[in-house]
Amino acid sequence: MSKFLVIAEKPSVAQSYAKNLSAYKREDGYLEGESCIVSWCLGHLAEYAQPEEYDPKYEKWQFDDLPILPEAWKLKVSKGKKKQFDVLKGLMNRSDVEYLVNGCDAGREGELIFQRVYVLAGCRKPVKRLWISSMEDAAIQKGFQTMKSEEEYKNLCMAAVCRAQADWLIGMNGTRAYTTRYFKRLVVGRVQTPTLAMLAERQERIEHFQKEAFYKVALTDGKLTVVSENIANEEAADLLAALCNGSTAVVTQIKKERKKSFPPKLYDLTSLQREANRYFGYTAKRTLDMLQELYEEKLVTYPRTDSQFVTEDMKDSVEELVGKMPVLLPFVDYGQLGHGIKRVINNAKVSDHHAILPTKEAVEKGIADLPADKKNLMMLICQQLVQATGEEYLYEKTDITVKCQEHDFKARGKIPVQMGFKEVEKAFKQLCVKAEPVEEKEKETSIPAGYEEGMRLFPVKAEKTTHYTSPPKPFNDVIFCERKEWIGIEERSSA
């Protein structure tokens, strides 16, 4: 009887596949059932060979030998992983295996991991692609029912190959070029070199920063305080304060507007890493590692996504998921749920994977027993789902302008009319964020009542205040998450 071979990226994922395929017989490096075999890759089992494996002359580093440009790329088994590679090679070439299923993570690197093993093993059998965004049993079962030909993912695979070859070419040639020129080992890489350049440039700006003073003049009649624009010259600020102090000011404009803020989007990997750092201080790597574990535990959907939306066919399941969020979030009530489901749906903005979501299994299992750091991450993802599908935040903005000694002084007030999604955001910060409070960009302030255009204010008190420009902030994980596309960071470990 012919069988098919499923190759996962990790043993834990292979076990989930095997469970859904009834492959329960344990062997050395794989599991087997009546109709299928399930094995795994242990991450990258194969890698590109070193320069000296192309030509012995490259054992000695010489500038004149550069650049090294392989005509035909050579693959080799990664150090310490030969045993599992031999298992896979043997399974691929078994006479009863009719075709293979690429069950590695559904993304660019998953394509590369499988392709390298497939090529190195000399396999020529047909391949189908398992493409799933959740490790829940229902998602796995549906994925196996809707597999596509590997040919449909050929361009994604070639993109991964291009990225890997670029890493090799820049790393091998750049490192040898700088090392032989400066007689000191200097490691160059596609990612690490521009990252280091960013750090060095920012540090130089910080070290050479010269703070500059600027000034403001504040007027008050005892209830309302209005402030001037920035003034560069201290003498000018002193003069304005002296002229205004004790004099008459006139309210020249009062402008009131009803404004709204729309809820945030769902999380993709980058935005989640940024927020996890702001709220809990987690590094980008720590967040990704925990997300991967939560994914394999079937509690969140696929983490390495660049989309903040879901597709139209997910509408009902997302609505159901939102409706169950109070089970996981004690600070959410049912009246806050599901007012804007349509806002998170956009087929055109979902390519390989949709936004990061909690799973139905997470609702059923609960998250109370999770370690504190994983629980924090789950709460962050869940509250974002409630916020993203919540009501708009409505507020009234009031701008008032007061003229004194031919200078304008202004104040702005902002009071909420409908809290909407911000009610969930506020409760989350109060109950779940134990670290230093996250800096608020805008504070709620109100303009005292009773002021009208044309009203004269007498006497007003004027005071000069001194302020200083600030140096650039040192880079942290938040900033690097926001800039990773510029430097092409590959967040995936090659281990």
Image: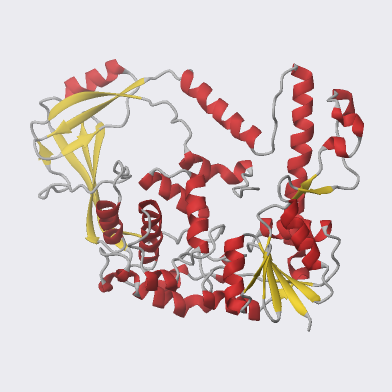
* Color encoding of the figure: secondary structure
Query: x, y (%) of residue 86?
Result: 78, 58
Residue sitting at the far bottom: 1
- Can residue 231 be seen here? The reply is yes
Give the total number of marks visible in the rendering.
0
As rendered, which of 345 and 75 lies closer to the eye? 75
Relative to 285, say whether 112 is above or below: below
Query: x, y (%) of residue 240?
Result: 23, 23
Residue at the (69%, 81%) spot, across then down? 34
For residue 363, side relative to residue 494 (left or right) = left
The quadrant where residue 222 appears? top left
Query: x, y (%) of residue 339?
Result: 35, 73
The quadrant where residue 324 appears? bottom left
For residue 475, side relative to residue 163 (left or right) = left
Which quarter of the figure is the N terminus placed in? Answer: bottom right
Relative to 269, say whether 59 is above or below: above
Residue at the (62%, 59%) spot, across then down? 10
Residue at the (29%, 61%) spot, across then down? 424
The quadrant where residue 188 appears? top right
Residue at the (41%, 69%) spot, across then down? 362
Query: x, y (%) of residue 390?
Result: 34, 67
As rendered, which of 116 and 155 lies closer to the eye? 116
- Can residue 262 be seen here? The reply is no
Relative to 316, say whether 165 is above or below: above
